[in-house]
Image (cartoon, rainbow, N blue to C red):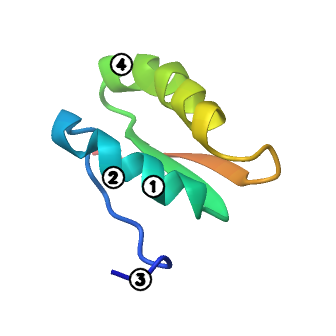
Amino acid sequence: MSRDVLQDTAGQERFCTITALYYRAAQGVILVYDMSSREVFEALPLWLEEIENYVPPEVVKVVISNKLD
């Protein structure tokens, strides 16, 4: 698989080891969350903390809300 391809693991635990490999090659990170779910919104700090642990500080990080019905 190309380094340019980003896998959406949907937070599944079984993909944690390969997710770290993708972070290393990242030039940017986009977090998309379901704005109709407070639980998902409240989990954003955990995801941001994980990103901070794996990517260099110069990597662009974007948070986008999605799914307004």
Dot 2 crowding, Cα within 10 Å, few <14, some 14–19, many 20+: few
Q: Marks 4 and 2, Cα distance to the nearest angstrom?
A: 28 Å
Mark 2 and mark 1: span between their CA atoms?
5 Å
Residue 55 in percent (x, y) is at 65, 46
What residue does disc 1 label?
21
Of residues 58 and 37, the one drawn nearer to the viewer in this rendering: 58
Viewed as shown, does residue 47 lie left or right of 60?
left
Q: Is residue 31 left or right of residue 19?
A: right
- Return the residue nearer the eye: 30 or 17: 17
> Which one is in front in this view, the residue at disc 4 or the one at disc 2?
2
Q: Which residue is mark 4?
A: 38
> Amino acid under label 4?
Arg
Badge nearest the viewer, 3 or 4: 3
- Residue 36 in percent (x, y) is at 31, 31
Going by the image, does 32 lie left or right of 11?
right
x and y percentages locating residue 15 in the rendered image:
24, 46
Report which quarter residue 60 is drawn in. bottom right
